[in-house]
Structures are given as structure tokens and as C-alpha cells.
Image (cartoon, rainbow, N blue to C red):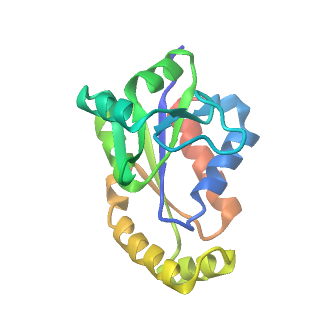
Amino acid sequence: MAGKYLIFSAPSGSGKSTIVQWLMEEHPELKLAFSISCTTRAPRGTERDGVEYIFLSPEAFKEKVAKNEFLEYEEVYENRFYGTLKSQVEHQVEAGQNVVFDIDVKGGCNIKSFYGAQALSVFIQPPSIEELRRRLVGRQTDDAEAIERRLAKASYELTFAENFDKIITNDDLDKAKQEVYEVVKEFLEL
């Protein structure tokens, strides 16, 4: 049986990746698998082509863009591209995997508009911008200027929430995990 498409988006610091990782590790019955994105950056550490990413040259990436082979893509820096190939996602779905997109809000909206009702889009939001600030400061990974940039971006990203099928507020991580699990289980009809 073919798989389905699950899109997760959120502002940085909302807990999306933590929730998605938990869902994938604790619920193998959901048959979840990350979409394997393409990138033009070099492999890092033990990353392998076709496993963590599909590694392409900037020229090869641009050729695929010209042929409309991507569901979505973004040029993060000059000649540093990331994108999701339609063919890769279809291959995973045909293999029976429920493909998970852990993606920014614009990419999430693009993928949702491509797949329509075949995809479930979930927006994870923080309880407030103040709480998001507290979490970002607590991570101790960014300086004050970077945190302000992330907060400005988060305020913008929050305006996209209404474009998603489900909005889950992560004010209590365990509760948010359970809500996401129930929404996904219902969508997959398990």
C-alpha cells in the first residue's frame, strides 16, 4: 500500500524537530521516513549520498530546477541550494513509507499545495513570542543578535499558521507530542 505525506513546519525553537524525532522513534507502526532532500553543500562527517541527503553540484541542481523536478527548493546562500525532488518522494511513497517533511513554512505550504488532500500539514507553534525568546536564550547556541533575527523570522512565520491543516501549540511538550500522534494516526487511518 502506498504511503502518504506528512508536513511539519514551525518557527525555530517551537519544538517541531523534537516532536517529529519522538514520533519516528516511538511509533514504528506509523511507518514514517524522512524525505531525502538534495543539497549542493559537501557531505559532513559520516553523511552518505542518498541516505541523509542527495549531494549534487550547483550545476546539476540548477538543471533539475530548469526541468521542474523539485517540489520545493531554496537557495540559502549563493550556489548553496536545498530542495526536495518529486521523484525521490514518489519512490519513498511507492515503497509504502509515510514521508515526513520537516521543513520551513514556505516549503511546507508549497508541498501542501502540490499534494492537496493527500498530505497532512501540521504547524507547531510556541505559546507566545516571549516563551520562544526564553527557549532560544536557554539553548545558549546563539548570541543576542541571532536570537533577535530568529524572533523576527518567527513572528513572520507565525502568520502562515492558518494555511496548515492542524495547528498545535507546544506549551507542554508531552501534551503536544500526544496531540501530534493522534492527528497523524487519524490521517493515516490506523
Q: Residue at x 29, y 33 (%)?
A: 65
Question: In this view of the protein, which residue sits in the foreground, 64 or 108?
Answer: 64
Q: Residue at x 38, y 67 (%)?
A: 158
Question: In this view of the protein, which residue sits in the foreground, 113 or 166?
Answer: 113
Residue 23, position as x, y percentages in the image: 67, 44
When the figure is inspected, residue 142 is found, relative to residue 114, above or below; the finding is: below
Q: Quadrant of the C terminus?
A: top right
Q: Quadrant of the N terminus?
A: top right
Give the image quarter of residue 144.
bottom right
Tell me if 73 is positioned left or right of 176 in this view.
left
Task: Please count the marks in the image.
Answer: 0
Q: Is residue 143 at least partly visible in the picture?
A: yes
Tell me if 75 is positioned left or right of 141 in this view.
left
Q: Residue at x 59, y 37 (%)?
A: 185
Tell me if 72 is positioned left or right of 103 in this view.
left
Question: In this view of the protein, which residue sits in the foreground, 27 or 79?
Answer: 79
Residue 145, position as x, y percentages in the image: 49, 84
Residue 122, position as x, y percentages in the image: 47, 50
